Amino acid sequence: MTNLIEIKGVRHAYQTDAGPLPVLDGLEISVPEGGFVAVVGPSGCGKSTLTRLIAGLMKPDHGEVWLHGERVKGPRSTVGMAFQNPVLLEWRTILKNVLLPLEIVPSKLSKKQAEERARFLLSLVGLEGFEDKRPSELSGGMRQRASLCRALIHQPEVLILDEPFGALDAFTREDLWQTMHKVKEREPFTGVLITHDLRESIFLADQVVVLSGRPARTQYVLDIPSSGPRTLDDLYTPEAAEQLNILRHQIQIAQGRAAPEDISG
Amino acid sequence: MTAQKYLRNIGVPLLAMAIFLVFWEWLVWYNGWPKFKMAAPSDLLPAYQRHWNLFITMGWQTLWRTVLGLLLAVLFGTLLGMIMGFSRVMRDALYPLLVGFNAIPKATVVPIVALMFVGQHDFNTVLLAFMISFFPIAVSVSIGLSTLEPEYRDILRSLGASQATIFWKIALPKTLPEFFGALKVAVTLAFIGTNLMEIVSPHGRGLGALFDSGRTNSDFPLMFAVLIALAFLGIVLYYIVVALEKIFAGWAERSPG
């Protein structure tokens, strides 16, 4: 098995009062080690269900999820998660928040080493000097940075990001995109990013997966050729415009607003 | 700066109390009310002087029974709140029962309890303080636990944390602000419970009994003096809870502006 994350033929339905509600139907995603895949799709198409499947928080009705050559059957400590809501614990300092996963996951790091690592991560995302502040004293963007550090502290094999920048303003978001590239350079990870933002997807990921409307299947896969960290200028090249154009069209198909035939346009 | 803050935090409430007492005194004097209609603050001092030893012993009895009832309410209310917060079925099952129980005026429970446990005055008083004050605690804990955002759970659960770990590390501390909010309500309620028992049951003890003896002897200043003593105890207990809240849930307080 060469891929770190392998999702094969996953189907899933939620049981509701009105009968089963299928959310995923024929999902195929594979992410090589060190790869970063963005998943885009219409609202309510089951993207968050996907993150819960990879994290082992739930099991699919059909199909398989593999992580590092092992079938996912339950939660695994080799996963780091960050959500749109940074869910920091208000009663802890930022440093103690970042250290939280190490209180659960068995770690080889001593207390001192763990703290050093937390401080290093915080400085990497630009939160140096905020270690002893409470989350309520930080802005939304800063809280999201701290949440990112918490997701990385235990050196997870897989980083799952569920619309982490969705609630931020445009400038803060672009700031965090660049931070993500900086982090990936120093702390390589394999990542899955759920997003609504097509520019975000082509800026951060090296592969964009478009899901169809509910029930979601893999509708389209776009590879983003890249050479090292990107800058915001890369978003304003003809190549980027073309990629966005393709993705926008695919989303319209997924929403049922465009016919699959005129895909050439 | 800090001296100024102290002055404001202590001086302002004291000033408000002084203004209240002056207004009370003026109201009685202006209307020419006799003592049996309304005693003035200046009438209370002799009452305290005459019965100060009674106030101390009775006040202590009221205080310890209230605090004991409150502690039991905290234990039982938290346990009940946990059960209702974690299990939807239990919440659906227990809520109507609880609401119904809470809707019963506790004054009607007093004679029943007094008959059930004849002569057990201490026990009865603690029981009533407990019965009247556990409800807000149970409700707040259950709401705090059941409204925990799923992401908080997921953060720890995705790392393989057990339910117990999630409870101790996240659910419990996150519920503390709600818990202390309810405790502030419960403190004053517990006092009501204690005094209800002390006043109504024959041969009672505590400040409630002192109030009752003032009533039978037509010693109106004594009755008012008891009320003020009760208010004083209530304020003391309330601020003890506030101090505990500052220690354990101070993080929830945001600096204004």
Image (cartoon, coloured by chain):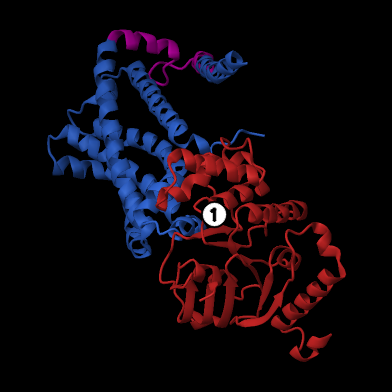
Chain colours: A red, B blue
Q: Amino acid at mark 1?
A: Ala
Q: Is residue B92 left or right of residue A184?
A: left
Query: In which image quadrant can residue B89 be found?
Result: bottom left
Task: Determine whether, in the image, residue A129 is placed left or right of residue B210.
Answer: right
Q: Is residue A258 above or below residue B251?
A: below
Q: In the displayed structure, would residue A26 be above or below residue B119? A: below
Q: Residue at x 83, y 71 (%)?
A: A239
Out of B201 and A195, give the one closest to the viewer: A195
Residue occupying the point 33% across, 44% down: B134
Residues shaded magenta:
B23-50
Q: Is residue A50 magenta?
A: no
The residue wearing badge 1 is A151
The foreground one among A155 and B18 is A155
Looking at the picture, how far across and down is residue A227, in whole percent?
A: 75, 64
Q: Residue at (54%, 68%) from the top-left corner?
A: A51
Q: Which residue is rendered at x = 78% and y = 79% of the image? A: A249
**Residue A158 horizontal/vertical position (percent):** 54, 63
Towards the viewer: A237 or A43: A237
The answer to whether residue A83 is visible is yes
